Image (tube, rainbow, N blue to C red):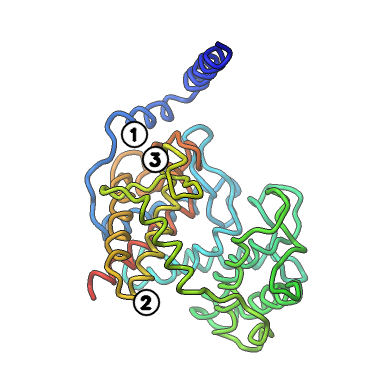
Amino acid sequence: MNVMIKSAADSLRRLRDYSALPGRARAAHRRDTRLGLGADPGIDPSVRAALAWLARAQDCSASNDGGVSRHYSLISGWGTSYPETTGYIIPTVLDADAEFGMDLRTRGKRMLDWLVSIQFPAGGFQGGMIHQTPKVPVTFNTGQILLGLAAGVKTFGDEYRPAMRAAADWLARTQDDDGAWRKFATPFANRGDKAYETHVSWGLFEAARIDPLTGVANRRQLSEDLEASMRCAEGALTALQPDGRLPGKLDSTWQPAAESVCLTGSVQIAHSWLLLYQLTGDRRMRDAGYAANGYVRRTVALDGDENTRGGVRGSFPVSGGYGTYEYLNWAAKFFIDSNLLERAVRAG
């Protein structure tokens, strides 16, 4: 009986919370849950729309500083700029400029200039959105921004080399002897070692590729084990549904642990599957990448409200547990990357 009472209370609370939402949020929830997925608009139209949404996210950032707004919320509107994700959006927009235009080169430079302006003297960058406190250097965020600085040096030359070197050298100095980074964790997450810190290595590799004088070329680096990557990819493959739906959470046996789909995670995993296909020739990886990308494309609108047109929800339905009622800038970035890789794979 107590369980039944609790369940009824939870349902009533959810109903009240839903009733308190702005009309645009309720309408989006109804659309997602009643109408489901739309038609697949294809790779090029959806990529162009996502790039246009990122441009609008830069223009509409609540902090109006040249960075890219973290999100557009159906509840509260545009957020302030997010240094971490602005950093790795830069390579995406610079790479897309030659084909898609849209003044993306100029936009990428504005992002770079903003990031250089907020870099700490020692070389690190803050965690969180630009308005959040405390403003302290954070390993992970610095590593993601380093990707953008390296792309800036590659595209524009020496103008961004000092900032790139400073960020890379700071990461090298603060790395522990066993290869982990523990000293400058984000204040916006629970403490403890996190596997995703290995993604910092990517930024260091890109910096060393462009400029061996950064001092990181001889540091201990973490390398991907292809066999382990395939085991993980194959496990995720068992959870993929025929229409490309991948549950937003999986348990230790690869069974669904969430009813909604994390669209960012879907395109990130799709990108990984496609990379593994390129490395191994395993067509299961290719077909899974195609399916997952196709599912996410079917959630992207090419018309309607300019604040959501071309954007990628945190979750589908939009009321799901990741980026709830939000369109996320990093979701759009990884969507673009994964779809352009799919196009390249299809082209052979």
Tell me the kind of residue under disc 2.
Leu
Q: Quadrant of residue 92?
A: bottom left
Q: Position of residue 56 (x, y in %)?
A: 44, 51
Depth order, front residue of 6/338: 6
Tell me the kind of residue under disc 1.
Asp
Q: Quadrant of residue 103?
A: bottom left
Question: What secondary structure is found at the residue carrying circle 3?
Answer: strand
Question: What secondary structure is found at the residue carrying circle 1?
Answer: helix
Q: How would you rate the neighbour count of disc 2 (Cα within 10 Å): few for under 14, some for 14-19, many for 20 or more? A: few
Contact? badges 3 and 1 (CB < 8 Å): yes
Kindly report which numbered mark, 1 or 2, lies closer to the viewer in this rendering.
2
Q: Position of residue 298 (x, y in %)?
A: 28, 46
Q: Which residue is depicted at the point 59% across and 53% down?
A: 82
How far apart in space, not on screen, are marks 1 and 2 (Cα)? 36 Å
Q: How would you rate the neighbour count of disc 1 (Cα within 10 Å): few for under 14, some for 14-19, many for 20 or more? A: some
- Which residue, given by chain and number where applicable, does mark 2 sit on? 279
Q: Quadrant of residue 95?
A: bottom left
- Counting residues from the start of the chain, the first of labels 1 and 2 encountered is 1
Kindly report which numbered mark, 3 or 2, lies closer to the viewer in this rendering.
2
Contact? badges 1 and 2 (CB < 8 Å): no
- Counting residues from the start of the chain, the first of labels 3 and 1 encountered is 1
Depth order, front residue of 197/94: 197
Question: What secondary structure is found at the residue carrying circle 2?
Answer: helix
Q: Position of residue 266 (x, y in %)?
A: 40, 53
Contact? badges 3 and 2 (CB < 8 Å): no
Q: Is residue 269 rendered to the left or right of residue 224?
A: left
Q: Position of residue 341 (x, y in %)?
A: 34, 68
- Counting residues from the start of the chain, the first of labels 3 and 2 encountered is 2
- Which residue, given by chain and number where applicable, does mark 3 sit on? 316
How far apart in space, not on screen, are marks 3 and 2 (Cα)? 31 Å
Q: Which mark is residue 32?
A: 1
